Image (tube, rainbow, N blue to C red):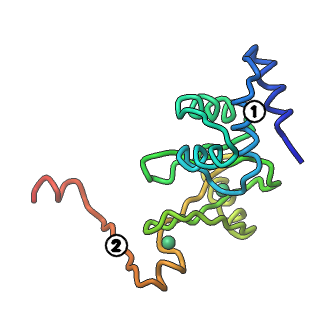
Amino acid sequence: MSFVHLFRRYLREQGLPVTQQREAIAEVVFASSEHLSVEELETLLRERGERIGKATIYRTLEMLVKSGLVEEHDFGEGFKRYEHLFGQKPVREHLICTECGKVAEIHSPELVRMQEEAARRQGFQPSRYRLQIYGLCADCQAAGAELRWEGLSCPIETIQG
Ligand SMILES: [Zn+2]
Ligand SMILES: [Zn+2]
């Protein structure tokens, strides 16, 4: 099942040219269930015999995000990751390994309920939200990695110290 026609339609609606490169980028993003960085995307494209520059990839990803077909994530790695939204999962909660960068998703109806309740207690009507949990994945723990304690640094203490 390809969703590229949705992107094609978006580009036409916006009066933007539908190019072979843009379609190839969208195809690769839609075909992946990963959270892709631009680097990874470039590699996947190269494997398909597409040589597309980073600038074009960035620009196309920007369009994909604006079209609402792709979501952009910032997992604190200093670069963005991209994930298409065709997984029928309205709620995406992420477990991010700070050692190897692996990202896993969790889907917990309990967590959804708790967050909605917490929002309502503030008189807030939630529409969507994002939960990111940082730590060590099972593989990294097995390999002996230890959690680096990020600490509760207080800015006032820092100034005094
Ligand atoms: Zn995700
Ligand atoms: Zn890990």
Q: How many marks?
A: 2
Residue nearest the viewer, comparing 73 with 37: 37
x and y, in percent, of residue 110 in the image:
72, 70
Name the secondary structure under disc 2: loop
Residue 45 vertical placement versus 142 (above, below): above
Residue that protrudes farthest toward the right in the picture = 1
In the image, 136: left or right of 110?
left
Q: What residue do we see at 54% from left, 65% from top?
A: 102
Foreground: disc 2 or disc 1: 1
Report the Cα–Cα distance between label 2 and label 1: 42 Å
Identity of the residue drawn at 41% across and 84% down: 144
Query: On screen, 144 above or below 80?
Result: below
| Residue visible at 80% across and 54% down in the picture | 87
Look at the image and tell me in which quarter the C terminus lies. Answer: bottom left
Amino acid carrying mark 1 in the image: Glu
Q: Residue furthest front?
A: 49
Q: Residue at x 66, y 35 (%)?
A: 65
Q: Residue furthest left?
A: 161
Q: Is residue 20 visible?
A: yes
Q: Residues within 10 Å of mark 2 (few under 14, many from 20)?
A: few
Give the quarter of the image for residue 95: bottom right
User: Which residue matches tag 2?
Assistant: 148
Residue occupied by mark 1: 23
The x, y position of residue 44, in whole percent, is: 64, 49
The picture places residue 94, in percent across and down from the top left corner, at: 60, 61
